[in-house]
């Protein structure tokens, strides 16, 4: 046995038939076990039309049931009926129902505040910078020339400076 013979990680010698082919190693599986081009790795995949849990739940909560309210039968969604029962239990003194109701109210208020947020307020410095940029654009449109910041402060243009300089 020579020290040049290939060995497995356990120190066993590899037989000539078990030698690792060229180009096989970390992140390089043997070509016979790789996915074939144009063939999906998950041929059956998720069946079309299968629904996720959220969709099934919302569909179930939108179903209508008949509820008695003040002696009258009324058709309401299951969600409305469940919330009405939760409110009634909380009013009768059920602490667990009260906690759940308060959590739902807090969550609903947070969502409403996020939806009703106004555009961010522009501070005075931002407003001043935007007005300065607009003023520069107007000057360029009117004169057809560009002016430096120093020229805008003095009201002088490139043409004026050229006329005032001695030749």
Image (spheres, rainbow, N blue to C red):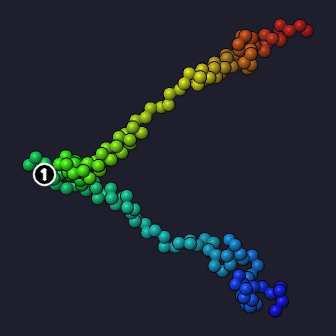
At 37% from the left edge and 61% from the top edge, which residue is drawn? 53
Residue 51 at x, y percent in the picture: 39, 63
User: Observer-nearest residue: 77 or 36?
Assistant: 77
At 70% from the left edge and 13% from the top edge, which residue is drawn? 153
From this view, report whether residue 133 is shown above or below residue 166.
below
Residue occupying the far right of the picture: 167
Which residue was labeled with disc 1?
68
Residue 43 at x, y percent in the picture: 52, 73
User: Observer-nearest residue: 148 or 89?
Assistant: 89
* Left or right, residue 127 beside residue 45: right
Quadrant of residue 146 within the rendered picture: top right
At 54% from the left edge and 24% from the top edge, which residue is drawn? 123
Mark 1 is surrounded, within 10 Å at the Cα level, by few (under 14), some (14 to 19) or many (20 or more) other residues, namely few
* Left or right, residue 120 beside residue 71: right
Counting every numbered tag in the picture gives 1
From this view, report whether residue 125 is shown above or below residue 115.
above
Residue 13 at x, y percent in the picture: 74, 89
Residue occupying the far left of the picture: 71
Q: Quadrant of the N terminus?
A: bottom right
At 83% from the left edge and 12% from the top edge, which residue is drawn? 162
User: Observer-nearest residue: 100 or 82?
Assistant: 100
Q: Quadrant of the C terminus?
A: top right
């Amino acid at each position: 046995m020579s020290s040049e013979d290939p060995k497995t990680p356990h120190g066993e010698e590899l037989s000539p038939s078990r030698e690792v082919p060229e180009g096989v190693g970390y992140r390089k599986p043997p070509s016979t076990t790789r996915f074939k081009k144009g063939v999906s790795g998950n041929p059956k995949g998720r069946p079309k039309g299968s629904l996720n849990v959220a969709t099934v739940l919302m569909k179930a909560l939108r179903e209508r049931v008949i509820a008695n309210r003040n002696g009258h039968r009324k058709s309401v969604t299951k969600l409305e009926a469940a919330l009405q029962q939760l409110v009634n239990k909380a009013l009768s003194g059920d602490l667990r129902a009260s906690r759940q109701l308060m959590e739902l109210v807090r969550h609903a208020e947070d969502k409403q505040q996020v939806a009703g947020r106004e555009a961010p307020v522009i501070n005075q410095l931002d407003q001043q910078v935007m007005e300065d940029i607009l003023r520069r654009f107007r000057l360029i449109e009117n004169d057809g020339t560009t002016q430096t910041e120093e020229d805008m402060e003095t009201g002088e243009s490139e043409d004026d400076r050229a006329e005032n300089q001695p030749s």
